[in-house]
Amino acid sequence: MRHDFLDKYSRINSPIHRLPSMAKLWISFSLVVAIISIPLRFFFLFPFIGGVLLGALLLSRIPIPFIFSRLLILEFFTVGIAMLSLLRPNGTMLFIALMTRSTLCLFTVILLSNSTPFAELLEALKRLKFPPLILTILALMYRYIFVLIDEMERMTRARESRSFSVNRRSRWTLLASLIGQLFIRSTERAERIYAAMSARGWK
Amino acid sequence: MHIPDGFLDPKTAIATSVLSFSGVSWALREVKQRDVQRKIPLIGLAAAFVFVAQMINFPVASGTSGHLLGATMVAVLLGPYSAIIVMSSVLIVQCLLFADGGVIALGANIFNMAIVTPVSGYGLYTLLRPFLKGERGRITAVAFTAWCSVVLSSIFCAGELAWSGTVSWNTAFPAMAGIHMLIGIGEAIITALVISALSTTRPELLYENSQSLSEHRSHGVLVYGMLVIVGIAIFVLPFASPWPDGLEKAASILGFEEKTPAHSLISPPMSGYRIPWISSFATATALAGLIGAFVAFGLSALLARILTPASSQKNMDAPHAP
């Protein structure tokens, strides 16, 4: 289990991390709703929200370059869609508003997900009466993403050590057979998990 | 295609949330009907699988790379109901863990990528299967439906953005549909390659082989078809009429429309989705879409021909030969 790069800072210790997850979930959700619904004539509120978020980031002791690289990757897609709005009449204002809003929302959610372990997030959702079936599936999925990434890397390494160079066409077929093999292994693993869970008296 | 927060207005966010909530709870009910305990680990693992498979990058022309979306593949492998739950779980984790796709826009993203894609993919697949026999027919159908589902889902995405007033339909639609007609080719090739590999080595893993063909299958597809049609009625039809909507009209009166360089900015196939000598936007769009679909179908058939060796095809077709 060395693949905790997905959310590796969500389990460190800081004032923000110690806040109850339920509170964090509500604060983030209402913040996102607020950012979206604040009319543009109150534009001065946006830098204020940004300042509060930055303060929270400093308090949370998460490395700042990590958060900003995350933000930058996601920003790439956002700009792509927002560009289309430039073509509207009065598009520049719309573009700026879109970018400000979506950046602040992204910042909020990134901060939430990196200061709350996923299990606690699920626990909070459970208390909000989320369907238990979905929560079980999400928990299983989160648990096995890391295992499947490991498995995929093992297969990739094995394939690379056996083939020197591949041409374009066989690279596609090799990748496809990798994905197919990953699916087969996933279903087999699901069978074993089911057997193990049943043996331990699952429902 | 993940819509971030801030791009949808309240009415679109609420409408899509209601649609996807009803869709997902319907899927949950269908899955619960039989042997649900066994399915839960399978769905969880399949969701993890899709998540990991989306991380694998494929080399596309000129140094760029794309990745699989996987909805049609999962629908063909696990059936439409499980596929809806699998794709929804993937989107929820991407939203909560990576902020990929907005929280408020989650309903819209689930509707576009977890309901429209598997349902249209699977529905079209079951429709085509009786006409496309044998292994070669299967691969043709899989490739073609994978392409169609990606394009359809992008059209929904454009419709929602336009409905929110974020972008105008006349730019969003050609841009999104055009780009995804290209992305869809990659998706079709990968899906076809994976399904062809699986159906030769492990045919029992395919949904159509694991299922007795009766059951409530057609009924369910009908229900979801209804859901998709409701979505089309809300998000696409208002724009597909030949008359420009209010804003467009205002823009054209004020002379803004001439300035929109949508067609030079991104050049989709069929040069901006219009055929020059046909003036009506709607007719031209329909024609271009139809031609695009024919080309995609031809390419799918070609791909199937490359992938399935002639000998296996002969064995498959033997009972049908005169």
Image (cartoon, rainbow, N blue to C red):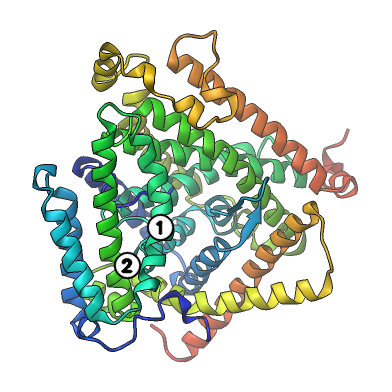
SS state under label 1:
helix
Q: Residue furthest left?
A: A42
Per the model, the C-alpha gap separating discs 1 and 2 is 10 Å
Name which residue lies at 72% across and 76% down: A157
**Label 1 amino acid?**
Leu
Q: In the drawing, does residue A154 fall left or right of residue A133? A: right
Circle 1/circle 2 CB separation < 8 Å: yes
Q: What chain letter is assigned to the residue under label 1?
A: A
Q: In the drawing, does residue A41 fall left or right of residue B248? A: left
State the image coordinates of residue B245 (x, y, percent, origin top left): 28, 20
Disc assigned to residue A110: 2
Name which residue lies at 71% across and 46% down: B139
Residue B281's place in the image compared with B221, above or below, is: above
Residue B250's place in the image compared with A175, above or below, is: above
The residue under label 1 is A74
Q: Which is more N-terminal, label 2 or label 1?
A: 1
Q: What chain letter is assigned to the residue under label 2?
A: A
State the image coordinates of residue B44 (x, y, percent, origin top left): 47, 71
Q: Quadrant of the C terminus of chain B?
A: top right
